[in-house]
Amino acid sequence: MDKALKSLVVLVLILSIAAVVIEIMLYRQRDELKGRNLKLVEYVGKIAGTIEIPQTNADLVARDAEHMKVTPDMLKQYYKVGDDGKPSTVTKGSEMDNTLVQLEVYSTRQYDRLNDTREGLVQNRATLASTSNLLVSTEGVLGTTSNTLVKTEGELTAANQDIEKKKEEITGLNSDIESKKAKIEEQTGEIAKLGEKLSDSESKIEAGKRYIVKVERELKACMGQFDTNNLPKGIQGQITVVSSNWNFVVMDILPESSMIPLTDLVVQRDNIFVGKIRVSEVRREQRVALGEILMDYQQVPPLRGDTVLY
């Protein structure tokens, strides 16, 4: 009997020691799980702070849009589905399940908006590249024209100076006509050459005028094929580039716009009348148009982002 009692005491002691060891191990695991849970709650709150709450108009997301706020109290209550298929409350506090579901919905919407923004940026990059190439080409043409004008002005100035010089020489030679007749004849011949150059220049100017008249007739004939009244009233596009030095703008036109050259359009910023522009070139395949700023109608300088109306 004593041996059996001793064996039972030893067994109870061994089981007690095993229970203490298991309790210590479970306590350590409890602390570890508690620490992980607190860390999870902390970072769920931080991540939720970066998720925007969708606005009424999903296309317009303000910089100061409201973000989700998840506190530890909101993650103290969760739901599970019972055998009857209905959710049953397990613990007390806020609604973890609803909070996490809402966080998933909002994060998915934000992810979709970011993908849409990424696609829009790719399209804008292509449009900007096309516009940049167009600007480079236009600046090159303007630079060539400017150099030609400077060269022509220099030649005209030199010719005028030469004529004035010859006139002064002729005036000075009048005092000695007999002795300087040969020189006067020589100077007269040079003046005649200059006159021929001037006549040649006038002929070129007349030819240029005739060409301009021809181009205007052709333009009017082309314009006769279009009726600007068919241009729908309303927004036609948006200004993307403004060049105040050359007095023109670049517009990104709408796909449904039937904009044609020589059409006068109204520039508006919110409810402010900015002025008017006249369309000079339309490139429909690139959805880009060039326009001249009409200074007589300008109230304030046009800016990028201004709306173009008809």
Image: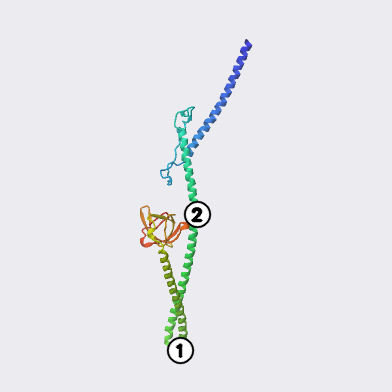
Residue 50 seen anywhere in this rendered image of the structure:
no
Viewer-nearest residue: 295 or 211: 211
Q: Looking at numbered disc 2 in the image, what kind of residue is underneath it?
A: Ala
Q: Quadrant of the C terminus?
A: bottom left
Image quarter where the N terminus lies is: top right
Helix, strand or loop at label 1? It is: helix
User: For the point 46% across and 89% down, which residue is it?
Assistant: 179
Mark 2 → mark 1, Cα distance in angstroms: 77 Å
Q: Position of residue 290 (x, y in %)?
A: 44, 60
Secondary structure beneath label 2: helix
List the residue tagged with mark 1.
Answer: 179
Q: Residue at x 53, y 29 (%)?
A: 31
Residue count near mark 2 (Cα–Cα under 10 Å), binned few <14, some 14–19, many ≥20: few
| Residue 145 in view, yes or no | yes
In the image shown, does 89 or 224 lie closer to the viewer? Answer: 224
Amino acid at pointer 1: Ser
Q: Residues within 10 Å of mark 1 (few under 14, many from 20)?
A: few
